[in-house]
Amino acid sequence: MSHHRSIGALASGCLALAVTFTPALATAQPNQTATQRLKDLQVLSITDFHGALETGGTVTVDGVRVPAGGAAYLATHLKQLRARQPRTVTFSTADNVGASPLISAAFHDEPTIEALNLLGVDASTIGNHEFDAGQSELLRLINGGCLPAGSAAGNRTSCPDGTFGGADFPFVVSNVFYADTDETILPPYTVINERGIKIGVIGAVLEQTPDIVTAAGVAGLEFTDEVTAINRASAELTARGVNTQFVLVHEGARPDTTAYTADCADGTTVSGPVIEIAEDIAPAVDLVMTGHSHQAWVCSIDDPAGQPRLVTQAMSSGRIITEHNLQYDPRTKDVVRASAHATNHLVTRDVAPDPRLQRHVDRYAALVQPIANRVIGTLTAPADRTPAPGFGDSPLGNLIADGQLADPTVVGTFGEPVIAFMNPGGIRADLDAGEVTYGEAFAVQPFSNYLVSLTLTGDQIYTLLAQQVTGANSPASGGYTKILQVSEGFTYTLGATGAIEGSVTLNGTPIDRSASYRIVTNNFLADGGDGFPVFSSGTDRYFGGVDIDAFAEHLATTSPVTPPASGRIVLG
């Protein structure tokens, strides 16, 4: 049973980027003698790094987009922050890998694990993207070892030096089990001794991970309620005498949504499933660090005992470091929450890059150049993933869907597909006009999913279109609307609960609910991912090639390409 439910506003305080926040506690401040014995402890956190070795992109500050991130610059900022405190630890709240730029993905994200080692990460949990290539590959990245010969297929290779040592730090997760067992796939927690301070670090990933990754990636695993698993681990740590406890949970919240809302002290609102999770985590936990939603915020959320507790998130792609400043009481062996405060720091690129990290990045940048620089086609105009006002499809989404429909590898014994569906979350970058390189195309589709053709009835297609705005994708239940991008010739009008009856057409002919239609999509969606379970009911499955290869081939064979205009999906 999931603990997620609709709740009212929480009494919380949240502040945004580059500000310091200290929760106002109802408990008394420590006296002078107690203050003198307290030890300062700095906790640094990053999240959703996604292999962003060269740059994290930009952050908007006072209306201006500021370049941010990059592993070498992140290392410098971490070093500067650590210089402030002798006792310091650094954590990641996961999605370290997956959806990575080509510089990391071309080497199966081994460069990212090596970079995190150099960055001095002390522990990490796992996120949904750690399962993109399945549990075996996740464990290989943690434990080390090379993929077997032949892994270079699809412009990827493993161990360019012949060896890969894996992570130098522990990964923890308390709520992922081997199916039908009580055994977690990784330790539920670790204990770090930082200059005499014992810190219990508990990990968890969102319970809904199987809904947003491929079925093959999580086969044989069971994802359980986050709070139940965290609280079990917390009780074990308490029994071991470890009173200072932190949680790394890969679940998030973002501004201006509707479910699980926390009204913040400065008038802003942050909402999402992690708000409720944080409210229910055992009072023994002193700090909750989150991820997944790629936002930067610092909040105070009451624990079950009614005491405020810091809950934070550090954006994504190495653009933000959250610094938590805590005080530890050696007598109680616990953190004094009354003095806790946190600050989100922008990882600017106006500092000297760390030499070791820069050499690491430069090496892999050189190794990937022959692949990245190969021109595969040209565009006569920019291809953007943002739909025009009033439409649910985008020029880039249309272009990708058209390429999937044209891919010959998905034409098997069951017939040729007539409709393609592409999930918008799988489109990760825009394309400029002019020449398009493989590296640029890869940035658009970095997951290397397989294409799958299957058969749906017209009635199932109507159900599919309704699932874009209902069920797991209903904003009212805490989800996010996901409008699938579609191929040329398929059109409809989308209403509040699905496609308007009779508006769904293929090449001008209304879809017949009782007829069968051959469609193509990626294996993530075909397995019911992103809250589209009707895909998993499709019949006569036939696996084709990799999605990025279909996109690259479509650009190559149709260039120069004019991106298809929005208008296939009208928002009613």
Image: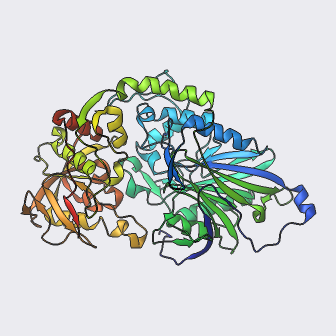
Residue ranking furthest to the left: 509
Residue 293 % position (x, y): 48, 57
Establish if 412 lies above or below 458: above
The foreground one among 134 and 112 is 112
> Which x, y percent locates residue 276?
55, 69
What is the total number of numbered labels drawn onto the structure image? 0
Q: Give x and y (percent) for residue 525.
A: 30, 53
Which residue shows up at 75% across the image and 59% down it? 243
Which residue is rendered at x = 74% and y = 60% of the image? Answer: 340
Above-or-below relation of 43 to 280: above
Relative to 295, 78 lies left or right: right
Q: Is residue 325 above or below residue 158?
A: below
Look at the picture and state if 94 lies above or below 247. Answer: above
User: Image quarter for residue 69?
Assistant: top right
Q: Is residue 488 left or right of residue 368?
A: left
> Looking at the image, which residue is at 61% across and 32% down?
353
Q: Quadrant of residue 143?
A: top right
Is residue 151 visible in the rendered image? The answer is no
